[in-house]
Image (spheres, rainbow, N blue to C red):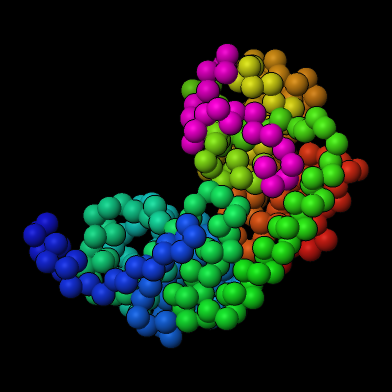
Amino acid sequence: MSLATVSRHLATTVFLLAAGAGAALAQSPVSDAKRIVSVGGTATEIIYALGQGDRLVAVDTTSTYPADTANKASVGYMRQLSAEGVLSQKADLIVMEAGSGPADAIAILKASGVPIATISTPPEASEIGNKIRAVGAAIGKDSEAEKLASDVEAKLKTLETEISALPEPRKRVLFALSLANGRVMAAGSHTTADAIIGLAGGINAVSDVQGYKPLSDEAVIAAKPDIILVMNGGAMHMTAEQAFALPALQATPAGANKAFIAMDGLYLLGLGPRSAEAAHDLAAQLYPGAVKPAESKP
C-alpha cells in the first residue's frame, strides 16, 4: 500500500478523539463491540477488571494478567505489531495503548476502517483513574469504569496517608530495567518506575535522570541506592547475583547489604487497577515492620 493510499484512507477513517485530565482517548463509535483486540497489558487488565474479558478475542504479549489472557490469541509484542496479524482477528474494536507500533503498522490499522481507541498512558499515578475511565468509555462501560476508578483512587489516597507516616530517612531505590555491556539501564524521572517508587514511599536514586538511561559506574556509585529494584521474569530479568557482580553496584549501600527486590513487571509498573496493592507490597519490602503487605491482590 502506497503512502498516498494510506493517507487517503486515513482521511476517511472513523477516529474520534476525546481528552481529559491527561488521559486521551481515541474512541470507537462501536462501544458495544463484541470482538475486541487489546494491545497493552494495563488496558487488557482494565477490560478484565470491568468484567468484559469475554469480549476479547486477542491480546498482545504484555497482557499477562489475569491468567485467562493465556487463552486468548496473541498479536505479538505491542511495539512490534503486524497489521495483518491484528486484522486477521476480525475485530470490531481495537483498544490500544499509546506507544504501540511500529508506525507503519499503526497507519495500516487506522486506514483499515476498524475503529481504534487509543489510550494514553502517562507515567503518573494521578492519571490511573483517568486511564480506567478512558478504557471504560471505549468499550461502553462508563459507569462501571467510574466506580472502579473511584475505588482505585480511594485506595491510593489511603496508601498515601499510611506512607506519609513513615519515618525519615526514606529508602533510596534504583530501578534497573536491564544490564547491557556491564552498564545498568536505570529508570529516572517521568517513568512508571519512578511513580511506583514514590507511591511506596521511596526516593528514586536517579531522579535527576529523565526516562530510561544507561548509567556509568560513577553515576551508579554516586546514586547511593539502598535497594535495587527489578522486574521478576521476562527477557530482561536480572538476578541479584548478576546485579551485585558489578563492581559499581557492589560499592553502593544496596551492594553492601545485598538489598534486592524483584516483582512482577505488569503488577509493579502497570499503573492500573492493582497499583495501590503493588505500591503497598513494595513499601512493605522497603520498610519491613513499618508497612504490612497488601491483604489482597485483585
Q: Along the horizontal axis of the image, is 129 left or right of 33?
A: right
Vertical relation: 1 (above or below) 182: below
Farthest right residue in view: 289
Residue 16, image quadrant: bottom left
**Residue visible at 27% across and 58% down?**
105
Q: Is residue 202 shown in magenta?
A: yes
Instruction: Looking at the picture, tell me which residue is in the foreground, 75 or 41.
Output: 41
Vertical relation: 154 (above or below) 181: below
**Residue visible at 82% across and 32% down?**
168
Question: Which region of the structure is painted magenta?
Answer: 198-219
Q: Quadrant of the C terminus?
A: bottom right
| Any part of residue 88 in sight | no
Q: Along the horizontal axis of the image, is 200 left or right of 51?
A: right
| Any part of residue 54 in sight | yes
Residue 97, image quadrant: bottom left
Q: In the rendering, at what x and y percent does residue 276 appear?
A: 71, 57
**Residue visible at 32% across and 65% down?**
85
Instruction: Looking at the picture, tell me which residue is in the foreground, 53 or 120.
Output: 120
**Residue visible at 43% across and 85% down?**
32
Q: Quadrant of the N terminus?
A: bottom left
Q: In the rendering, at what x and y percent does residue 136 appear?
A: 51, 74
Vertical relation: 151 (above or below) 280: below
Q: In the rendering, at what x and y percent does residue 125 appear?
A: 60, 52
| Count of labels in the image | 0
Q: Is residue 225 shown in magenta?
A: no
Q: Along the horizontal axis of the image, is 70 left or right of 261?
A: left
Vertical relation: 58 (above or below) 291: below
